[in-house]
Image (cartoon, rainbow, N blue to C red):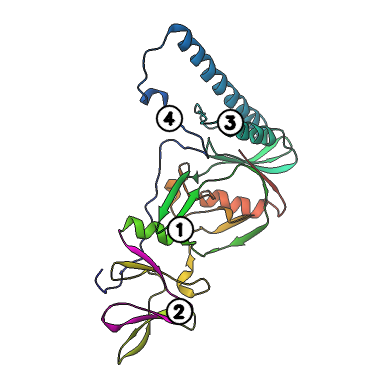
Amino acid sequence: MNSTRQSTRMRPTLLGAALICLGALSCTHPAAVSREPTAPDADSARAAELAGQDSALRADSAKLDSIASHGEVAPPTRVMHFESAADSLNFESNRELATQSSGYRVIVSLFDRHLWVVDGTDTLRSAPAAVAMDSTLAYAGHVWKFETPRGRRTVKAKSENPLWVPPDWHYAEVAKENHLALSKVPLTGSVKISNGKRLQVRNGEIGIVVPDSGWMALPLDEEVVFDDTLYMPPLGTKNRRIYGELGSYRLDLGDGYLIHGTPEESTVGDAVTHGCVRLKEDDIAWLYENVPLGTGVYIY
C-alpha cells in the first residue's frame, strides 16, 4: 500500500462450500470419492449403514414437516459421516432434543441448513438458513474456530437495524486475504507509520497526524491500511462500527451467536457464516415480529 490508505472497505471473501462440515463432522458426496474395491459383504454393510443414516435423517425431516399447516416439503437430506463417536453422539442427542421439543420454539438443522418456527404441532415458518463454514482461521499468532454450536439456546434480545462491531477475526481475515500485516491502533497514545506520520484516536475516531499539518480524521467506512499493514481500530471507536452487515433485524442467542439478516441473500442456504444463523430479509423480519423473547432455539 506504500503509505496510502485503502480507498474502499475490504470485505472477506465468502468461503462458500457445496457441502458443510459441522464441528468434527466430515461430509463428502459419495459420488465424488474414489474408493478401493471392497468385498461384496463390505459393500453390503456400508450400503446398509448409509441407508440407515439416510432413513433416520429423512424421518426427522418428515416429522418436522408433518406438523406443517401449509403442506411444505422438507429440504433435501444428505448422507452424514462422522469423524468420531463423540461427534456422532453429540449430533444424535441434540437432534433428539429438537425433535422431542414442544411448545413455541425455533428449530435449526445445521446439516439441512434450514430453520423452522413451530408452535405445538403447527409449523408457522419454514426458511432456508446459512450456517457456519466450520473452518479455522490462523493468522498473526491467533486462531479462531468458525462453527455454529449445537444445543438449546434462548432468544435473549432482539434489535432492529443492528450495529455490527467486528471482532478481531474480521480484521485478521481481511488482512490474510489481502496479504497484509496486522497491527492495532491504541486507544490512547499513537502508532508511527511512514514519513513521520502517526495514527491517533481523538474524539472516538482514528485520524492521521501529519507533521506541521495537525490531525485529520480518516473515513469511518474504510479499513485503516498503511504501509501494507491493516490496523485494527480500538473497541468503542466509531471506526469499529458497521451498519447493514447484519441485515434489518437480529435475534441474540447469547455468547456472540445471532440469528440475523444479510444484504447478501444469495449466500443463504450455504455454509458461509462465522457461527451465526443467517436468514433472508423476509424471514428474519417475520421472526423479529413473531418470536418472543425467551423462546427456545434448538440447534442440531
Mark 3, other Cα within 10 Å: few <14 / some 14–19 / many ≥20? some
Res. 195 image quadrant: bottom left
Q: Which residues are magenta?
A: 179-199
The amino acid sitting under disc 2 is Glu
Give how far apart the Cα atoms at labels 1 and 2 are: 21 Å
Q: In the image, is residue 282 part of the stretch drawn in magenta?
A: no
Q: Secondary structure at mark 1?
A: helix
* Mark 2 or 3, nearer chain start: 3
Mark 4, residue position: 28
Q: Which mark is residue 205?
A: 2
> Which residue is drawn at the image coordinates 72% and 37% (left, top)?
101
Mark 1, other Cα within 10 Å: few <14 / some 14–19 / many ≥20? some
> Which residue is drawn at the image coordinates 32% and 77% (left, top)?
193
* Mark 1 or 3, nearer chain start: 3
Residue 204, position as x, y percentages in the image: 49, 80
> Which residue is drawn at the image coordinates 57% and 19% (left, top)?
52
Q: In the image, is residue 185 part of the stretch drawn in magenta?
A: yes
> Which residue is drawn at the image coordinates 43% and 46% (left, top)?
267
Give how far apart the Cα atoms at labels 4 and 3 are: 16 Å
Mark 3, residue position: 88
Give how far apart the Cα atoms at labels 2 and 3 are: 48 Å
* Mark 4 or 2, nearer chain start: 4
Mark 1, residue position: 169
Using the rendered image of the protein, determine whether residue 11 is visible from the camera's viewpoint: no
Q: Secondary structure at mark 2?
A: strand
